[in-house]
Image: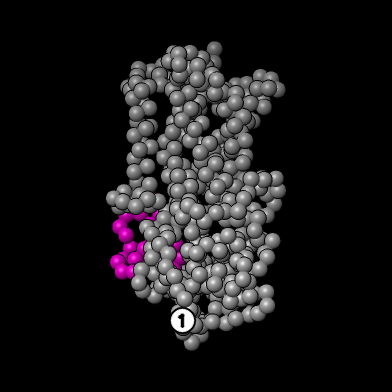
Amino acid sequence: MPDQRLPSSPGFWRSPLRGPWFTSVLGLVLLVGVTVLFVTGLLSYAAYNPDLSPVNDMTPDKGLLGFYLFPWPTHPRGLYRLTQGVHVTLGITLIPVLLAKLWSVVPKLFALPPARSLAHALERISLLLLVGGGLFEFVTGVLNVQLDYVFPGSFYTLHFYGAWVFFAAFLAHAVLKTPAALRAVRRARDEGDLVSPRPAAPTVSRRGALGLVGGGSLLLFGTTVGRSVDGPLREAALLAPHGGDEPAGGPGGFQINKTAAYAGIGADETSEEAWRLVLVGRSRTVRLSRADLLARPLHDAALPIACVEGWATSDQWWRGVRLRDLAALAGHEDPCDVLVESLQRHGAFRRAALRANQVADPDSLLALRVNGADLTPDHGYPARIIVPAAPGVLNTKWVARLTFGELR
């Protein structure tokens, strides 16, 4: 008889909650939730237009994994705010469900023998990829949301490849287990190897445990979602970056990730006397001062800034020169791709590429003012990019140079 003190013994696990019904309900929730996470994650990756230019490509060896990529649109204006808000908020909301699901099947991880057959060995390996990949994706995602970059290497590369490994294992597991899970939920009867042979006295029902998991998810939802939407929930978004109170008031009183000081941007580079915008085009190079730009036709656009960490500002009123007008000034009558370069000397997105459709949009601006006042240093003074539906990092601050033309 197996030693009941060892986790490899079924009698070691005595919770009366474990069983096919409890596990199956959690699994079906994850089936829907993880699929949405995967799709919105791929959309987030596509929003960076990684096949446009090497400067945008955080995963240059992606190969066939980039089969789905398409030019990211500028309509609807809040597209990235929606897709990334869903991705981050749903990911955090699903954490209690994921942890409860792993708890419900943990006896299987210790079952002996490790492999009863070749098929059983392959199943165990797939489970290791599933569990390891899931934990990796959720942990790195939460760390990125909290702006805590303690993992080795680029978040974009790690999260992208990790997502494909996790979802491949998840898909295989779902194909094998979903029919059985649906049967277990319909029967609502517990039998099988997850049921303890000597269960302890229950302290909560299975439905009560599901209610506890659901309550935890609702709590995480309520303390996260407010940073990707407008309204009273913004003040409750304590777990989101830039959660809680709004920044100090005034025209520049909205969220940022990196300050001018952090980026090493000083007044000696951004003063009226020192700063010039360089436009490079097909037939000529143009240098413009800020006064030159302010003297050109200016346009307004009400747009948010939406970031990969899942937070977004409310709509801000931007005023500046249309990118397509600057392209024409550089000799490109038809809007074309543009390489944007910042005064910032370090960082992954001090250079970024935008597609021709983004340059052509009438709301795509080289912004000089926001909410009726000059940009503040932290918001990109003397000039920054603002493009509808683009991730925040592509709305480059402290712009120094725009190079128009074919970038592929």
Identify residue for label 1: 295
Residue 330, placed above or below residue 301 = below
Extreme front residue here?
333
Q: Is residue 293 magenta?
A: no
Q: Quadrant of the rendered structure where residue 302 is? A: bottom left
Closest to the observer: 285 or 392?
A: 285
Give how far across and how far down residue 99 sits, in percent: 45, 34
Give how far across and how far down residue 123 sits, in percent: 63, 26
Q: At 59% from the left edge and 28% from the top edge, which residue is drawn?
A: 173
Determine the main secondary structure of the stretch shown in magenta.
loop
Give how far across and how far down residue 199 sits, in percent: 41, 16
Apparent side of residue 99 relative to residue 179 in the rendered image (left or right): left
Closest to the observer: 166 or 379?
A: 379
Q: Secondary structure at mark 1?
A: loop
Residue 76 showing in the rendered view: yes
Residue type of the residue flagged with mark 1: Ala
Q: Which residues are magenta?
A: 239-259
